[in-house]
Image (cartoon, rainbow, N blue to C red):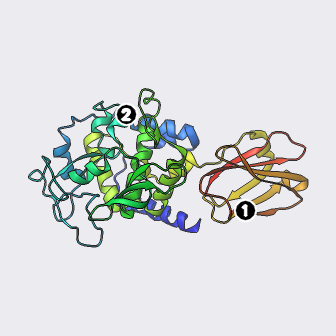
Amino acid sequence: MKRTSMLLGLAIIGQLLFSQIPSGYYNPANGLSGTALQQALHNIIDDHDTQTYGALWNAFPDTDKKSNGKVWDVYSDVPGGTPPYQFTFYSDQCGNYGGEGDCYNREHTFPKSWFGGEVYPMNSDLFHIYPTDGYVNGKRSNFPFGEVGSASWTSQNGCKVGSNNYPGYNGTVFEPIDAYKGDLARNYFYMASRYLGEDNSWPGSPMVNGSQPKEWALNMLFEWHKDDPVSQKELDRNDAVYDIQDNRNPFIDHPEYVDMIWFNTAVTDEGLLNRVNFNVYPNPIVDEIFVRVAGEASEGDLLISISDGSGRKVFSAEYTSEEHISIDASRFSKGFYFLSISKTDHTTPVVFKFVK
């Protein structure tokens, strides 16, 4: 928990120092969480200035240029090292390719087949479209992102194709290198919010329902988001895309929005919560869940139960007059959980949503 907070804090400090967020841009989202926050963000970033697909070639030198003037290709770059090859803008555009390093093209990191093909504005939305090696892009195809156990193919910078090793899906996936997993995760959170309520006709995929990540994918993307915090590259790209599209990626400007939307406390009984004081932490959990109890709740019997994302109960116990409760979660597998707290004489619980 301390590590997650530190990373998010550093990302926010970076945003304050370097990112050019217009004054008041996120004011309509203040004080909100959960679906209300996601809807508010949708309203803020909706109706962006749609570009033509062809115009993206001219946008990339502003959005994806390295300090040496070369194309910033996340499928061939080696952060802190020497890339196996680098592309020059315009002269190395695809074109035909027969192998890595031949040319770069326009990669829909959220594949266009998932939203129905060459449909606007999704087809040219720069927040999910990167310049990438054409051959590697072809290997990625429209496979979901995932974590590969045994690779059937590996790119020169370490991207992989193979069976997914992340719980919840075992099909073929494409795994980017660790240095760009957070970037790609925040693209998906952007898509889920920008196209919220506009995706009813989208075909979807094993990774998403419409624009919304499925449970296994959401868990994985959240881990990627935490482990690879916002970089200067993302901050600069966010500003550059804003200059072109007139909208921003909220999850680059405010990384904490991810937790506030998808992993925030869910309360089923406002009245009970107002009369008592429960604190459940950390979130995400590691091996233990801690519950702090105060107020009315500490004065009588308390029932705590935990269910996984499928509704299967994995823990249940009663406590009497305890203020600090520790629950062993070391045997829990990765995924969503719901922790329910109620007085034994109270039928409606308070429910907290957390992830491991």
Q: Which residue is mark 2?
A: 115
Is label 1 in a helix, a strand or a loop? strand
Q: How many marks?
A: 2
Q: Residue at 13% across / 47% down in the picture?
A: 96
Quarter assignment of residue 142:
top left
Amino acid type, callout 2: Phe
Query: Horizontal and vertical percent for residue 132?
Result: 24, 53
Structural crowding at the residue carrying mark 1, measured as other residues with C-alpha within 10 Å and reported as few (<14), some (14–19) or many (≥20): some
Query: Horizontal and vertical percent for residue 111?
Result: 34, 41
Query: Horizontal and vertical percent for residue 45?
Result: 39, 38
Q: Residue at 43% across / 54% down in the picture?
A: 163
Q: Which quarter of the rendered picture does the N terminus lie within?
A: bottom right
Is label 2 in a helix, a strand or a loop? loop
- Looking at the image, residue 168 sits to the left or right of residue 272; the answer is left
The furthest residue to the top? 201
Q: From this viewpoint, is residue 23 visible?
A: no
Which residue is more in the foreground, 174 or 263? Answer: 174
The furthest residue to the left? 91
Amino acid type, callout 1: Phe
- Looking at the image, residue 119 sits to the left or right of residue 348; the answer is left
Query: Horizontal and vertical percent for residue 167?
Result: 54, 54
| Label located before the other in sequence (2 or 1) | 2
Q: Which residue is mark 1?
A: 290
Instruction: State how far apart marks 2 and 1 are (Cα).
Output: 41 Å
Structural crowding at the residue carrying mark 2, measured as other residues with C-alpha within 10 Å and reported as few (<14), some (14–19) or many (≥20): many
- Mark 2 or 1: the one toward you: 2
Compared to residue 150, the image places residue 194 above or below, namely above
- Looking at the image, residue 181 sits to the left or right of residue 237; the answer is right
Which residue is more in the foreground, 45 or 290? Answer: 290
- Looking at the image, residue 105 sits to the left or right of residue 241; the answer is left
Which residue is more in the foreground, 93 or 291? Answer: 93
